[in-house]
Amino acid sequence: MGGFAFGLLVGFGVYKAVDEQPGLDHESGSAQEMAGPAGPRAPGQGAGPQGGGAAPMVGELNELKRRLEADPKDLDAATKLANMYYQVGMWDQSLQFYDIALALAPDDPNLLTDSGNVHRELGNHVQALERFRRAHEADPEHWQSLFNTVVVAAFDLKQLELADVAMVRLDELDPAPAQLPALKKALADFRAQETGQADAP
């Protein structure tokens, strides 16, 4: 992958729900800057160690689990559990609760996008793209799912045509996130590198 290190994914539901949890530390100032506990990583690097961050507040986790056990349709509890585990990089546990939440709200674009981010962290790139596709279908103006499609399609799977389609739509929406210029530059540089390798004797 050479020197490319653009691995930043964005989510919305994670920041919103975690913001309500006083026991968790998050320094990011906006949803657009929220990517995950480890921040940017090299494309294709795969997931970090399970539980690599600070442990969530045990009392909050247990209370949310009790709520979900008492009411399996408690979407708020399932979402908050997924987001708390996401925040500390416990990807398997996070995905478990995202899937529970999605069973209750299958067309929620934020849940689909954030669970797609988890799939990417676990190295499940095809599944990640599928979640982003579903998120965009559910909300055609959901720019986070398009942004993440560009990242995964280009840098993880080298599907540059798919990345280009998503980038065109992203430009049309003009969300103006701070990372968009960096993403465009990384994509152009990556394409040049790939073209150079293809042309090499």
Image (spheres, rainbow, N blue to C red):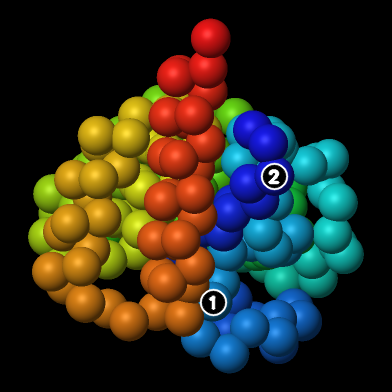
Which residue is labeled 2 in the image? Answer: 3
For the residues marked 2 and 1, what is the alpha-carbon distance in whole angstroms?
Answer: 22 Å
Percent x, y of residue 88: 75, 59
Percent x, y of residue 144: 34, 63
Which residue is labeled 1 in the image? Answer: 33
Depth check: give the residue in front, 157 or 69: 157
Snapshot quadrant of residue 164: top left
Q: Looking at the picture, which amino acid does disc 1 mark?
A: Glu
**Is tag 2's residue or tag 1's residue first in the polypeptide sequence?**
2
Percent x, y of residue 126: 40, 26
Q: Residue at x 46, y 61 (%)?
A: 185
The residue furthest front is 201
Q: Quick check: 131 left or right of 92?
A: left
Element assignment for label 2: loop
In this view of the protein, can residue 170 be seen by the observer?
yes
- The disc placed on residue 176 is none
Q: Residue at x 57, y 59 (%)?
A: 8
Depth check: give the residue in front, 6 or 134: 6
Mark 1 crowdedness (10 Å alpha carbons): few <14, some 14-19, many ≥20: some
